[in-house]
Amino acid sequence: FDTTGGVHLTGTITLPRRSRISPPPLVVLCRDIPGRRARAEFNRDVQAVAAMGFAVATVNYRGSAGFGAHHRDAVKEGFDAIPIEDVRATVAWIATHHPINPMRVALLGEGFGGFIALRAAQLFPDEFRCVVSINAPTDLADWTVETSRSGGRTLPDFGFEARQVFFDRARLTPSVTDQVAATDRPVMIVQDLAKADLRESQGTNLRAAMKRHDLHVEYLPTTAAFTRGDPDVRERVFTQIAGFPNDHIYDFRVDLGVEKEVK
């Protein structure tokens, strides 16, 4: 579809076979950028989230690779603002074309997509119920200069070289850790503690800052097997992830009314 600003966007929408409510809530999966070219093939993560009863949307927002240099490089005018603009436009378009509940929307992102999800909830807390970030940088200025390390040794890292070229540090937005007071949206941080190219402090600093502000945050440490895509490990972690949007998308409060004595 074309946005009101004239940007052509593509993506996928996966509807659940069963949902707790009708129409179902929506989870938007935020892509890593620039990342690899998106392919129209089976996606385990999408299917796992849809099996939880959520509609699942992916969007190839500006900054995504595989759609030409103009589409990819347009994000450099705003590394958070532009993808978030495209995510919001996508939610609005889906709400008018598919049976989803636009008042119950969650964000899930991996890598830089996790950063975009966190910033979207900070900038537009009324539009998103909760966020799950997976191996996400939270301080871009530090992340762009962090080399891969293991056992005290610096490792060759194409991803680091790509970040140096693609991300202009002068245009990077403030750390999400420094902006936590801007939102009260619940956050789950999923982090591979052995990930060589992402410091553990990227997640733990955000967790500490949210706790200082008495905000709801959950921290789920994982292993390299999850990041590599081991199906058994990935299934176990996504089972744990499943409970988080279920707790925060739905409203389980019950109005009991006025008490009455029954004789």
Image (cartoon, grey):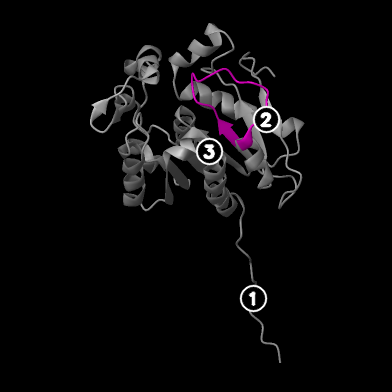
Queried whether the magenta region covers residue 7, the answer comes back as no
Earlier residue among tags 3 and 1: 3
Distance in Å between CA atoms under marks 2 and 1: 51 Å
For the residue marked with disc 2, what is the amino acid?
Phe
Residue beneath the point at 54% across and 24% down: 85
> Residue 258: which disc?
1
Earlier residue among tags 3 and 2: 2
- Judged from the image, the secondary structure of the residue bearing numbered disc 2 is loop
> Residue 230: which disc?
3
For the residue marked with disc 1, what is the amino acid?
Val
The mark lying in front, picked from 3 and 2, is 3
Residue farthest left in this picture = 152
Would you say 116 lies left or right of 102 here?
Answer: left
Residue beneath the point at 71% across and 53% down: 20
Asked if one can make out residue 1 in the rendered structure from this viewpoint, the answer is: yes
Residue beneath the point at 49% across and 21% down: 33
Horizontal and vertical percent for residue 139? Answer: 34, 31
For the residue marked with disc 3, what is the amino acid?
Asp
Distance in Å between CA atoms under marks 3 and 1: 52 Å
Q: In the image, is residue 221 above or below residue 174? A: below
The mark lying in front, picked from 2 and 1, is 2
- The residue pinned by badge 2 equals 42
First to last magenta residue range: 28-44
Image quarter of residue 12: top right
Quadrant location, the C terminus:
bottom right
Earlier residue among tags 2 and 1: 2
- Judged from the image, the secondary structure of the residue bearing numbered disc 3 is loop
